Image (cartoon, grey):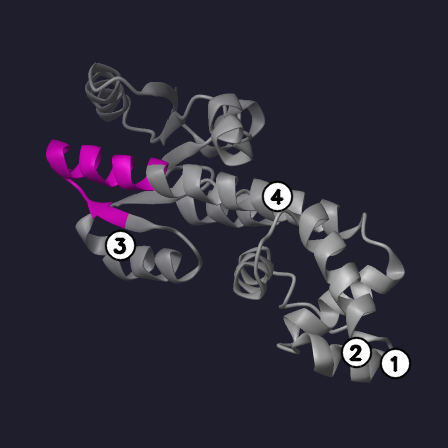
Amino acid sequence: DGSAARRRNMKKPIIHIVDDDVELVESFTLLLQTMGWEVASYTNGPDFLRTSDLGSPGCIVLDMRMPGMTGLEVQEELIKRGCKVPILFLSAHGSISIAVQAVQHGAMDFLEKPVDPFALVQKVSQAVTLSIERIAQDSQAEDFRSKLGLLTPREKDVIREVLAGAQNKEAARKLGLEVSTVKMHRANAFAKLGVHSQSELIKLAYSSRVLDAKKDNP
């Protein structure tokens, strides 16, 4: 199906390690590569922001305290860019409270130094899974909104009523149409959208954030 095709076409996950501790970067890189991950490493924030491929799924292992540009500053720039790759912060004992603040601003989690290798692998695996899910959901949402745009004005009217929970008779009364006409538009719209029931449509509309918009959408 379409979702399976999207997964096949998805880029290979990349683990980005950003830390000014060269030895740590080398040991983490070797560990994760041994586990089969593709790894890109950087010793400072500006290099990472300038050269990294953030269009692929994966995760960012980001040191909290680096000279020149801190991990929080890197996170702020990533937020501005709309980057959705999950961030795992590396935090020294004295910066745990800052790490918690970073999580509150969207980072997935943080690991306290010295980092347990097993914990790192586990967290990276969880982050990559989350990243792949996010990309798949965004792709599904984009696909759904694109299909909504192909509906006729009357089909959109009917779908709007369906999303509001209306049954055929109620929708017909509100729109001043015959019930048979509503059924026809509903069936045509469902076929275009690739859904088979009202509940499936509503679920997809929520996951695609269509129902977060004003009622004049779709």
Q: For marks 3 and 4, give the CA distance.
A: 25 Å
Crowd around label 2: few <14 · some 14–19 · many ≥20 (10 Å): some
State the quadrant of the C terminus: bottom right
Q: Residue placed at 74% from the left, 65% from the top?
A: 183
Would you say the magenta stretch is mainly helix, strand or loop?
helix
Q: For marks 1 and 3, give the CA distance.
A: 63 Å
Say which mark, if any, is on residue 176: 1
Q: Is residue 29 visible?
A: yes
Look at the image and say whether residue 117 sits in the magenta stretch: yes
Q: Which quadrant of the view contains residue 58?
A: top left
Crowd around label 4: few <14 · some 14–19 · many ≥20 (10 Å): few
The mark lying in front, picked from 1 and 3, is 1
Say which mark, if any, is on residue 172: 2
The residue that mark 4 highlights is: 81
Q: Position of residue 160 (x, y in %)?
A: 73, 69
The mark lying in front, picked from 2 and 3, is 2
Look at the image and say whether residue 54 sits in the magenta stretch: no
The mark lying in front, picked from 4 and 1, is 1
The mark lying in front, picked from 3 and 4, is 4
Q: Which residues are magenta?
A: 110-128
Question: Tag 1: residue type?
Answer: Gly
Give yes or no for contact between labels 4 and 1 (Cβ–Cβ under 8 Å): no
Identify the mark nearer the N-term, 2 or 3: 3
Residue 193 placement, left or right of 60? right
In the picture as drawn, the residue positioned furthest to the front comes out as: 180
Identify the mark nearer the N-term, 4 or 1: 4
The mark lying in front, picked from 4 and 2, is 2
Question: Tag 4: residue type?
Answer: Arg
Crowd around label 3: few <14 · some 14–19 · many ≥20 (10 Å): some
The residue that mark 3 highlights is: 95
Tally the numbered discs. 4
Residue 32 placement, left or right of 197? left
